[in-house]
Amino acid sequence: MEDWRPSASWERLQQRAALLRELRIFFAARGVMEVETPLLASAPVTDPNIDAISTEHPAGGHQLLWLQTSPEFAMKRMLAAGSGPIYQICKAFRRGERGARHNPEFSMLEWYRPGLSLAELMDEVVAVIRLAVGEVEVEYLSYRQAFERHLQIDPFQAELETLQQAAANHLDLNFDSDDPDLWLQLLMSTVIEPALAADRITIIGDFPASQAALARVENDEHGQPVARRFEAFYAGMELANAYDELRDVSELLRRIRRDHVQRDSAGRAMPPIDRQLLKAMQAGLPECVGVAMGLDRLVMLASGATRIDEVIAFPIERV
C-alpha cells in the first residue's frame, strides 16, 4: 500500500467510529458533559517520564507553547469553575513515543466525576472497557498483592538490594540505580504486567506514595501511606490511569518541585509551571476522581488489531 493512503483499513476505521458513538451515548446517559479544551498549552506536565513537544507562539513573541500531553490541566480549570462531571475525546502529543502501541500523536479519552468514589470510578472504567471487549471478568488487586503474587515481594518493605536482585532474576540488565521507584516501575512493567491474566480486566490500586503523581495520599489498612490511584489492564495492555484527585495547591507545588529535581538530575528540560492551573487550584478544585484512557488502545481491542497503525488513519510516518 502506498504511503499516502491510510494505514488502517476502512473496516477498522468504521469500528473506531462505532466505538466513538457508543462512548458518547454512554457518557450522555450518565449526565457527563462533553467538553473541548485547547491542544496548545502554556506549560506542559512536569512528569519526569513524559516529554512534551514545544512550538513557537502562533501570535508572535518569545513565549513557547506546548502541544498537550493530556487535557488534564485545562479540564481541572473547568472543574474549579463549576463545570460538574465532564469528559473529553481529544488528540494528545508526546515526544519520542513510537512503537506497536505508541504514536507521538494519539487519541485520549479523559473524564472527571465530582462526588464519585474511586471504587465507583473503577466500575465506570470497567464499563467503558467492556464497550470494546464485551462482558469479561474483572480482578481487583492492590499494588502490594500484585508484587506478592508475581514476585513474592512486599514492595513497601523490600530493600533496594532485594528489588535489584528480583530484576536481575528476570531481566538482562546493563544499568544501575539507587532509586527504588525505578526498580519498582521496571518490575511492574516487565514482570508483573505481562503476567496478568489476558482474558480479564485487572485493576491494580494503592500505588506507593512516591508514585502518586497528582493523586491524593492516605494510609491504607496497614498504616502505609499509599497513592489513591489505580491502573486498568486487559490483554497485556495498560488502558487507564485513574486518580482520587489531589486538591491541595501547596502539595501540588511540592510535587512539581520534586519533578523538577528529578528532571534536572537526569539532564532533562525544565518546563515552566502552569500558573493558570495553580490559580484554579487556589480557587478550589471540587472533590473528584478522574481517569485518562488510551482511546486507540480501546479500538485495538475492539477490532483485534495488534499495532496502533491498524486503527489510526495516518501514523507519524504518513503525515
Image (cartoon, rainbow, N blue to C red):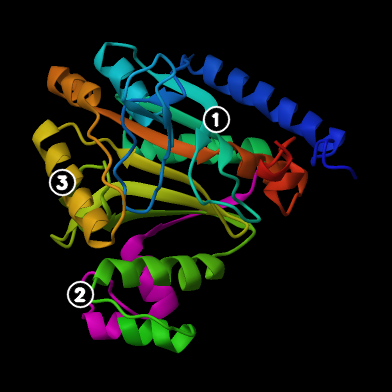
- 304 horizontally vs 9: left or right: left
Q: Residue at x 69, y 41 (%)?
A: 315
Residue 121 to residue 263: above or below: above
Q: Position of residue 103 (x, y in %)?
A: 60, 46
Separation of residues labelled 1 and 3 (CA atoms): 27 Å
Give percent across and percent down for residue 151.
Answer: 40, 79
Left or right? Give the position of 54 relative to 164.
right
- Amino acid carrying label 2: it is Gln
- For the residue pair 139 and 108, the one nearer the viewer reads as 108
In the rendered image of this protein, does residue 283 appear above or below residue 92?
above
Give coordinates of residue 270: x percent, y percent: 26, 45
SS for tag 1? strand
Q: Is residue 155 magenta?
A: yes
Q: Which residues are magenta?
A: 134-163
Q: Which residue is mark 2?
A: 157
Horizontal side of residue 21 vs 31, given as left or right: right
Residue where numbered disc 3 is placed: 257
Q: Earlier in the sequence, mark 2 or mark 1?
A: 1
Residue type highlighted by circle 3: Arg
Of pointers 2 and 3, the one earlier in the residue sequence: 2
Which residue is disc 1 drawn over? 91
